[in-house]
Image (tube, coloured by chain):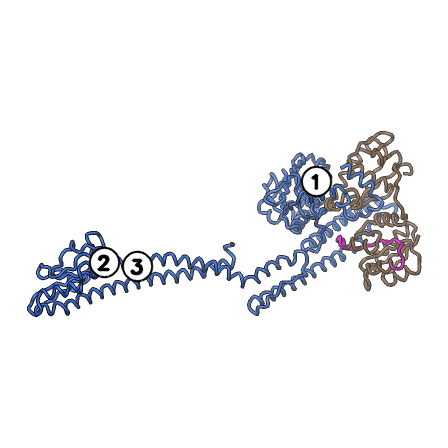
């Protein structure tokens, strides 16, 4: 369960509210019940005492002690009477209902009440065996002036039992109700949120391959329907903007390439002129070289826009990365040798990803080319390939000039360079890393960089690892052996293929 | 040999026509796709060079209509776009070759010649330029009878140069042929390999066969006529 999901948060909110209400309710119930029980016990003691006064003590002097004893024994039989009753006159016991049997409470041990104690008052005490008791004492003065003390009392144990049970019930019931409310609420919340989940899933798909799809409209007539409509309108506008961007890329490409063609053609024609002064030849050649670079920049820019816009059609197939990395490095080894750079390569076998072979190669080419460019002679470049947490990781590290920390975030931007003069010498387009970044993006991968200025730079590419069955692996390897699959339709493919095959086999 | 050039950009067509005429081809030019179609129906051209972005009607439409009428005439497409989509579609529509703008004239000429020849290039097992000899079966290279040891890439590069001896090959052509498009961004890879190849082939010989044509590329040529 995602703790930040709307569903969880709403459920948590409701459960918290319910908990507060339940706790408040429980406390109120407990206090109320306790007050009510205590009050009714007091009332019963009070009633008993006063009815004894009225019914038995008032006629006592007329009817005599024998009658009194008989009546009392009948109304409040010893051992059975609840509440217990004791009647005293000047320290002498007139009547005593004795120890209680159910529950057993020893009354005989209780001190006799005296007039000094508060009369007409309830007080709590304990029996000698520790039971809690509530006792009520009232004084009666007969017409003859005799002072008689009437004491009624009861055990508070049943009351406390009841309260304890109530407490237990509330203690168990509250969390129980809360738990049921939480689970039920969480499940209930799934229903109104289901369209949102569907919207989210569909939204993930839109734009991955093409914009064509739209989000499902939720025909609920409520906020969700409005949301889905609004999102779709937003996608419409995005699609329009993207289409515009792609059209612009194509147009710009055309508009830039045509003049470049003409410039190039005119310069070439000039170069053909007989008896051209050396200076003119030099100038024209230099212009041609720059024209060449400009076409490369245009080409790279278009590639990046298309990759970013998802407009580049790529052939996404299962690919074994290690062999691609090794073969590409082999092709570039001479570039490293030129600068006496040690190029080392450490690849784990069986690392598969889904991707376009051409573009994956280009990642390696651009990263290693970049490393060679920015590593002084006698430096070292290490290439590593391994799998880590469901990702295929490609690391290219060098002992080059490094990049200042403040410049790191800008490195992947188009035309970014740490050192303008340097790259001019090495003739780059300033787009190498931007292309790698765009390719990584189009492959659901990431590109990151670490650098210590003047010491080293490490570029790290991560791509989603592809899990293949044994059978798929053997199928894949039977394809990879055929060199044709890693070439696009080549211009000379018809007549040159056999020679090409020879070379591939040799490599 | 008669070539039809359908290209709306007047300066480009002038350049191409001038270059091809200098190579003794007869070239007709039209800036309009419909007119181009009429031309193609009336005259038996040996080759049609077709720009993809035309006003009124698109190059792919023109290509489709040409193919409906004439299955055999080779068509070379000029395009300012280079997405793979376009390339695949063009071959499906029946284009024989394509060239992305901007291009070196040498490259256009080479493709034109290749299409007009209409047959395999030099497929003989031995390529020879002057005293430099390359045996395709044994992959052995000799200069003046002396063995020259080459790596696989150097061999591929030399074979490509020798196959097109006396012709300038642009860096792009070399990259796409000997390497592949993923190496596009780093043109100096060609320069480095050519330097190494030169050291092995030309060193110790007074005549240097591998020539740099500044601003364009490289070529290999014999010394006998130079």
Secondary element at tag 3: helix
Which mark is first along the chain, 1 or 3? 3
Q: Nearer the viewer, mark 2 or mark 3?
A: 2
Q: Which mark is residue B2?
A: none
Instruction: Give the residue number, with chain letter if any, for mark 1.
Output: A323
Q: Is residue A115 visible?
A: no
Secondary element at tag 1: helix
Residue drawn at x 80%, y 38% is: A502
Instruction: Give the residue number, with chain letter if any, for mark 2.
Output: A155
Q: Which residues are magenta?
A: B68-85
Disc 2 with disc 1 on a shared chain? yes
Of residues A20 and A423, which is closer to you in this image?
A: A20
Q: Nearer the viewer, mark 3 or mark 1?
A: 3
Q: Is residue A359 above or below residue A28?
A: above
Of residues B194 and A282, which is closer to you in this image?
A: B194
Q: Colour of chain B?
A: brown
Q: Quadrant of residue A211?
A: bottom right
């Amino acid at each position: 369960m995602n703790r930040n999901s709307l569903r969880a948060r709403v459920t948590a909110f409701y459960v918290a509210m319910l908990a507060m209400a339940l706790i408040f309710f429980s406390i109120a119930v407990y206090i109320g019940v306790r007050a009510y029980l205590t009050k009714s016990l007091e009332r019963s003691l009070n009633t008993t005492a006063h009815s004894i006064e009225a019914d038995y003590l008032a006629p006592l002097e007329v009817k005599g002690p024998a009658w009194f004893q008989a009546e009392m024994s009948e109304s409040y039989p010893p051992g059975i009477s609840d509440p217990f009753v004791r009647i005293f006159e000047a320290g002498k016991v007139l009547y005593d209902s004795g120890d209680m049997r159910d529950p057993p409470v020893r009354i005989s041990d209780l001190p006799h009440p005296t007039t000094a104690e508060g009369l007409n008052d309830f007080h709590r005490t304990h029996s000698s065996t520790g039971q809690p008791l509530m006792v009520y004492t009232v004084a009666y003065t007969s017409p003859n002036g005799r002072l008689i003390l009437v004491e009624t009392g009861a055990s508070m144990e049943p009351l406390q039992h009841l309260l304890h049970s109530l407490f237990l019930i509330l203690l168990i019931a509250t969390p129980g109700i809360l738990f049921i409310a939480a689970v039920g609420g969480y499940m209930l919340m799934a229903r109104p949120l289901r369209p949102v989940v569907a919207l989210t899933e569909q939204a993930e798909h839109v734009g991955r391959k093409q914009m064509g799809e739209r989000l499902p409209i939720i025909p609920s007539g409520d906020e969700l329907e409005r949301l889905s409509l609004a999102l779709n309108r937003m996608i419409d506008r995005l699609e329009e903007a993207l289409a515009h961007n792609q059209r612009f890329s194509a147009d710009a490409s055309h508009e830039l390439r045509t003049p470049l063609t003409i410039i190039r053609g005119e310069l070439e024609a000039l170069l053909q002129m007989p008896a051209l002064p050396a200076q003119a030849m030099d100038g024209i050649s230099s212009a041609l070289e720059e024209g060449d670079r400009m076409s490369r920049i245009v080409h790279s820019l278009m590639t990046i826009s298309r990759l970013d816009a998802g407009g580049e059609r790529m052939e996404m197939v299962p690919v074994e990365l290690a062999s691609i990395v090794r073969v590409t490095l082999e092709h570039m080894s001479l570039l490293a040798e030129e600068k006496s750079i040690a190029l080392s390569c450490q690849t784990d076998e069986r690392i598969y990803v889904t991707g376009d072979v051409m573009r994956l190669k280009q990642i390696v080419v651009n990263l290693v080319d970049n490393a060679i460019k920015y590593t002084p002679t006698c430096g070292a470049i290490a290439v590593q390939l391994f799998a880590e947490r469901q990702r295929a990781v490609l690391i290219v590290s060098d002992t080059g000039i490094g990049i200042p920390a403040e410049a790191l975030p800008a490195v992947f931007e188009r035309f970014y360079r740490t050192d303008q003069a340097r790259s001019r010498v090495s003739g780059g387009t300033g787009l190498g890393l931007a292309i790698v970044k765009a390719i990584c993006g189009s492959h659901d991968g990431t590109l990151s960089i670490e650098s210590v200025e003047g010491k080293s730079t490490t570029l790290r590419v991560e791509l989603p690892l592809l899990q293949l069955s044994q059978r798929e692996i053997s199928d894949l390897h039977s394809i990879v052996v055929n060199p044709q699959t890693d070439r696009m339709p080549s211009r000379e493919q018809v007549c040159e293929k056999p020679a090409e095959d020879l070379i591939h086999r040799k490599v | 040999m008669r070539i039809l050039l359908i290209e709306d950009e007047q300066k480009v067509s002038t350049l191409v026509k001038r270059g091809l005429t200098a190579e003794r081809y007869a070239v007709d030019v039209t800036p309009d796709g419909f007119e181009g179609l009429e031309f193609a129906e009336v005259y038996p051209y040996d080759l049609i060079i077709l720009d993809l972005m035309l006003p009124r009607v698109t190059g792919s439409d023109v290509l489709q209509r040409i193919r409906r009428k004439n299955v055999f005439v080779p068509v070379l497409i000029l395009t300012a776009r280079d997405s793979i989509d376009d390339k695949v579609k063009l071959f499906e529509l029946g284009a024989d070759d394509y060239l992305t703008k901007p291009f070196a004239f040498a490259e256009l000429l080479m493709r034109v010649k290749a299409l007009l020849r209409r047959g395999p290039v030099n497929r003989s097992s031995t390529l020879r330029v002057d005293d430099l000899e390359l045996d395709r079966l044994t992959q052995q290279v000799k200069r003046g009878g002396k063995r020259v040891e080459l790596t696989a890439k150097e061999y591929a590069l030399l074979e490509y140069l020798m196959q097109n001896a006396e012709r300038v090959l642009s860096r792009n052509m070399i990259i796409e042929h000997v390497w592949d498009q993923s190496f596009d961004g780093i043109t100096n890879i060609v320069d480095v390999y050519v330097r190494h190849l030169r050291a092995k082939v030309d060193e110790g010989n007074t005549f240097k066969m591998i020539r740099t044509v500044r601003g364009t590329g490289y070529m290999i040529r014999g010394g006998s006529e130079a």
